[in-house]
Image (cartoon, rainbow, N blue to C red):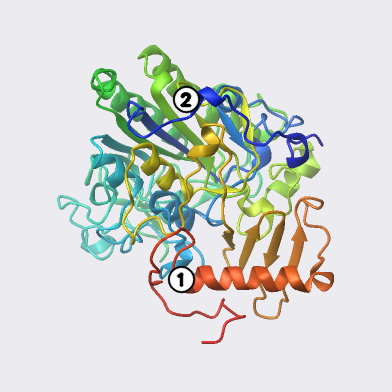
Amino acid sequence: MKFLSVATLVLCHASAGLVLHAGQNSRPNVVVIYTDDQGYGDASCLNTEAKFQTSNIDRLAREGMTFTDGHCSDTVCTPSRYGLLTGRYSWRTELKRGVFGAERKCLIEDGRVTLATLLRDNGYATGMVGKWHLGMDFPGTNAKTRDWSQPVLNMPLDKGFDYFWGIPASMNYGVLAWFDGRHAAVPPTLFTRKKPNAIAIDDYRIMPPYEDTAVRPNDLEVAPDFVDSECLTRFTDKAIDWVQGKAEAARDGNPFFLYLPYTSPHKPVIPIDRFKGKSEAGAYGDFMLETDWHIGRLLQLLDDERLADNTLVFFSSDNGPERTFAERIERFAHHSAGPYREGKRSIYEGGHRVPFIVRWPSRVKPGSRCDVPVCQTDLLATLAEIHATELPADAGEDSISFLPSLMGQMHKRPAVIHHAVNGRLAVRDGRWKLVMQWRNKPQELYDLETDPMEANDVRASHDDVAARLQQTITDIVRNGRSSPGANQENDVDWWSDLAWLKQ
């Protein structure tokens, strides 16, 4: 397999003339495109033997900087989205394992700085279109007590976004409707459940017919007009409409921020007809082709509106590929996780090493690459530095600006913490990755420079490295932050996954 690897890349190269000084930029528009369960090997620019070509993602890489050692802050939906938007590891919150359903108190507490509040306070119009999955407060406590004439609370419009159009969470959690702001145009007053999806591996559908009453205790609330396969088209249409409405103001120096979290290639795997059978990786590959096409629609809009040059586009995924990646290897010889071990939910590289690309034509050298480890939590500090804005002590606790690397002057990134769905932690510092003891599992140590597939645990022969990394993760946990600044409090003092620390 031919994947872009650390050994084949030049460190963060770009022309010296691109150095950005505070106050000399013209406030770029910012677009964050966030796919769902897309692995490192699901971008053909990172996997030359992919069984489909992601031409528009490849375009972003060709016209921007590819971070080959880029990581989501967790290995499943909710905590990764929290880390991306707040610059803080989600394991510092009440959420230690798993994900949220559609309905519960938002994980982002009131008053916390987010990408949206940072940019709003710097004069940006802020819009979100897509999947939220951080908790919402719906009217009523259950389907029997709903009053959909009342507004939804504790949701994107309360976390810095001026505009929201999308769905509350992954489709398997229900309360499915097209929410426009605080209301659904067609309320989710019907019921359904997962239905078989014959075209994909171990998959389901959310599609009519729906029932007037619940048949099973865990039936999903759904709107009469909701169909799962319409998500990508509706999201992209709404995103394009919103950006078009901001284009003239943006050209006049009043920028916008668009957060576009797609629902693909997360289950249900449901490519529309024009893409069925177009890849060599089954329905999953077809679905990635559709996803890439919608990304291209948005990039074309930026070109058409003469916005591309001063728009920073950040592209990444919330975690590695779903477990179906193993059968795709057998059936199609397509490696969704690239050369990395395991996938979604896992503490190993396949769980959290993801596509991580930044395009900003007026500033970033086309086709540049960087192999410094970076985390999605770092986007907040990067945007703050672009705007010469100092984050308060209780914001972006795990956010380190990678702007120097974008400008061709390699930045230094302190240790990155990884977190699995079961709560297990790991610490990455340079070439070394220490997977912490958890329940009855001992520590594991990997040299990612010589063993990126994590095939050889060298813990027994490197006591000194393990001791140093254990102290590093201990300090990061106890200090409430990994970025410079005053120590902060975690939301919980101690929890059982910190097996190496005494309560």
Question: Residue 86: x, y in percent?
Answer: 38, 53
Residue 323 visible to the viewer: no
Q: Which mark is residue 363?
A: 2
- Where's the N terminus, which quadrant? top right
Q: Does dot 2 land on a helix, a strand or a loop?
A: loop
**SS state under label 1:** helix
Residue in the image at 45% along x and 62% along y = 90
Mark 1 residue type: Asn
Q: Is residue 320 left or right of residue 169?
A: right
Establish if 161 lies above or below 14. below
Q: As shown in the figure, which amino acid type bears the numbered disc 2?
A: Arg
Label 1: which residue?
A: 479
Kindly indicate the quadrant of the structure image that contains residue 307.
Answer: top left
Q: Of label 1 and label 2, which has the lower sequence position?
A: 2
Q: Which residue is drawn at 55% across and 37% down?
A: 405
Q: Estimate the x, y position of residue 68 in percent, counting from the top left.
A: 65, 40
Mark 2 neighbour density, 10 Å: few (under 14) some (14–19) many (20 or more): many
